[in-house]
Image: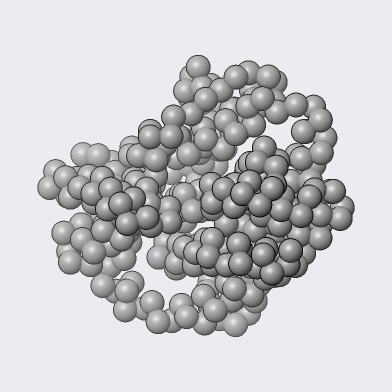
Amino acid sequence: MTGAIGIGGVIIFRAAGLPLPFLLGPMIACLVCALAGVKLASWSPLTNTMRTILGVAVGASFTPAIVSQMGEMLASLALVPVFLLICGVLGYPFLRRVAGFDKATAFYAAMPGGLQDMLLFGEESGGDPRALSLLHATRILLIVSILPVLLWLVWDIDLTLPPGAPLSGVPVLELAAMAVAGLAGWGIAKRVGLIGASLLGPLILSAVLAFSGVITQRPPAEAIQLAQFFIGLVVGVKYTGITLTEIRRILTAGLGHGLVLGAVTFVFAELALHLGLAPPLEAILAFAPGGQAEMAVLAIVAGADVAYVIAHHVLRIVLVITCAPLVFRILR
């Protein structure tokens, strides 16, 4: 039933000519149905498999020419810790004092990092896992819903076009190499305990293959669209079972916190642009605190410098996961 609702969302978005129909269509359709009380579900093994496709798509962007330019990103990457600090300094008081959440819930909800990791750390510290899940889901929902509209209206970027070559245009040997990079990269990354294994493992292995010339293009458009579909489903499904009380308190707080993060994102994007560190499109995508998978989709479909954008998001996630528990212990 969840899949049928998602397909209906894609059809509506495509018929209306709206941006990112394969991502926003199922996400909004599932969100509306969840708020209406419909019971939805997703299956983690399948959605994680879809994330491997995005990992391969991002890794395929790391060509020798791109890698040679990585040193130029250092000044821009140096802004990421400052960005996170300001997000925490503004977000925590808002969620703690204005929204009234307990210390652990407010702190880990204010950290724009990996959803699953923030839920784990927050629950271990005595936070409310349901509130944390909905607050982070709302953050991602806002970023992924509003940003494409801005790209569409401000930069006039057509986000309805296929995100790459069709299946028939990708050589069979490269398809096989991509499949190996996705599955083997995921398995190896999971075994060594890498953060975000289903995305970062395939990303690293496919980057090696791209740099060596084995992979010369991204996965076919149909595969990337399929990944978008299931990632959109997951965001919408998280609102299943939400009550009126949660809507009034948690969803409202999440929207307010999202506006705070949006303001900080705009300031840092302007700073990166003013310092000549990135063009406007890359600057806004690099500092928008959405999920790794969702931001990878936006970067690919918008035609941005995927390596630049994802490098910032990987650093953001790593810093939050490694530093947040330590900072919380110090504050407590």
Residue at the image point whose x is 63% and y is 46% from the top: 123
Q: Position of residue 89 (x, y in %)?
A: 75, 67
Q: How is the image coloured?
A: one colour
Residue 90 visible at all: yes
Residue at the image point whose x is 31% and y is 65% from the top: 62
Q: Position of residue 37 (x, y in %)?
A: 68, 19
Q: Position of residue 45 (x, y in %)?
A: 38, 34
Where the C terminus falls, by quadrant? bottom right
Residue at the image point whose x is 40% and y is 65% from the top: 307
Residue 19, quarter of the rendered image: top right
| 231 relative to 283, above or below | above
| 253 relative to 26, above or below | below
Residue at the image point whose x is 74% and y is 46% from the top: 254
Q: In the orientation shown, which residue stands out farthest toward the right?
A: 98
Q: Is residue 173 left or right of residue 94?
A: left
> Which residue is at the front of the view, 83 or 156?
83
